[in-house]
Every structure is written in structure tokens, then in C-alpha cells.
Image (tube, rainbow, N blue to C red):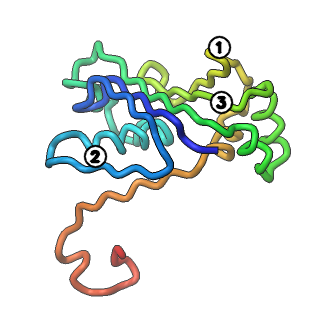
């Protein structure tokens, strides 16, 4: 299973962005053009809003009327589901997919604690306990911020970034 498209609306400096993903992608740009915000939007999709953070601070121009939407489309969903080890989660995902190999997941500021699933452009209501199955199903995302201070890399220790 892999990401095929990423849509971001009203996240920090990004008013609207649609990105079709290929097998290898490089993000290059000048400072303050939105690269970090792009990846933090994906982090919002995976993890929701962090503890102690205000959702309005993440909205485009910090306008409370703007709704954040991060939507990620995947292809190869059936193969991804069939590789799952947890049988209960696998069954929930396969039932939600209903034989479709393409799936779209969306998280918004309207309900930042939940992600919605769309199969064949129709929202699917997978029932209770689906978020645990979804976390098991989705490819892992790890965002590592490259902003480092000299002191954190000057000496090699067990916490030194490599």
C-alpha cells in the first residue's frame, strides 16, 4: 500500500495544496515557503492535534472560521490489509474496503480526534473501535525535524541525532 495523493486545506501557511505522489519525492524550496508545514499537516493527519495545542493556531491565517482538511489517498489497500497480522483489525479494514483497492482518509479541524474513511467516493461508517484498526493498517509516518542546535550534535551521546 502506498500514498497516491495528498490534499491539504487551510493548514498554517498552506491555503490549498494538492500533491500527487510518485515512488520517490524530494521537497526543495526556500526558507518559509511551506515545506515544514506540509509535513506537519501530514503529522496532524496521523496524530491529530498535540496536547496543549490550540487548533486555531494551526489554521490558515489563524482564522477560526477556516476548516483544516488533510486528505490522503492510498492505492494497494487490499494488499496492505492482507498483510496485517492482527486478525480482528484485518477483518475490520477488509469490511470497510468492500473489495476496493483505493481508499481515502481525511482528518479535519471539525472533528480533529477522528479520521473519516471514503471508499469509491462514499463515506464509510466502520463502527466503534475502528481507529485502532486504522492505526494498525496505515503505513507508519515519522517526521523528524532537522532543526538542531550545535550543542545537541557537538558531542556523541545516546541522544545525538544521526
Q: Find disc 3 in the rendering and name its residue.
A: 102
At a point 28% along the width and 61% down the height, the residue shown is 146
Q: CA distance from mark 1 to mark 2?
A: 31 Å
Are dots 1 and 2 in contact, CB under 8 Å?
no
**Residue 55 numbered tag:** none
Q: CA distance from mark 3 to mark 1?
A: 12 Å
Q: Position of residue 160 (x, y in %)?
A: 34, 78
Tell me: residue 59, above or below residue 22. Answer: above
Are dots 3 and 2 in contact, CB under 8 Å?
no
Q: Position of residue 5 (x, y in %)?
A: 48, 33
Q: Quadrant of the N terminus?
A: top right
Dot 1, how many residues are within 10 Å of its Cα: few (below 14), some (14-19), or many (20+)? few
- Mark nearer the viewer, 3 or 1: 3
Q: Position of residue 91 (x, y in %)?
A: 83, 37
Dot 2, how many residues are within 10 Å of its Cα: few (below 14), some (14-19), or many (20+)? some
Give the side of residue 92 with respect to residue 134, left or right: right
Dot 3, how many residues are within 10 Å of its Cα: few (below 14), some (14-19), or many (20+)? many
Which numbered disc flags the more N-terminal residue, 1 or 2?
Answer: 2
Q: Find disc 1 in the rendering and name its residue.
A: 122
Give the side of residue 28 with respect to residue 69, left or right: left
Q: Secondary structure at mark 3?
A: strand
Q: Find disc 2 in the rendering and name its residue.
A: 36
At a point 73% along the width and 24% down the height, the residue shown is 126
Amino acid at each position: 500500500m502506498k500514498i497516491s495523493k495528498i490534499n491539504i486545506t487551510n493548514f498554517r501557511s498552506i491555503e490549498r495544496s494538492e500533491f500527487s505522489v510518485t515512488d520517490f519525492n524530494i521537497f526543495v524550496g526556500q526558507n518559509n515557503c511551506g515545506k515544514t508545514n506540509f509535513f506537519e499537516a501530514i503529522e496532524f493527519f496521523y496524530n491529530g492535534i498535540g496536547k496543549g495545542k490550540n487548533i486555531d493556531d494551526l489554521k490558515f491565517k489563524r482564522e477560526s472560521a477556516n476548516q483544516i482538511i488533510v486528505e490522503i489517498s492510498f492505492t494497494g489497500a487490499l494488499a496492505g490489509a492482507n498483510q496485517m497480522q492482527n486478525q480482528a483489525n484485518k477483518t475490520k479494514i477488509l469490511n470497510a474496503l468492500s473489495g476496493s483497492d483505493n481508499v481515502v482518509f481525511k482528518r479535519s479541524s471539525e472533528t480533529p480526534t477522528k479520521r473519516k474513511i471514503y471508499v469509491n467516493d462514499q463515506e464509510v461508517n466502520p463502527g466503534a473501535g475502528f481507529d485502532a484498526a486504522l492505526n494498525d493498517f496505515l503505513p507508519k509516518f515519522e517526521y523528524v525535524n532537522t532543526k538542531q542546535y550545535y550543542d545537541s550534535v557537538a558531542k556523541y551521546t545516546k541522544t545525538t541525532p544521526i
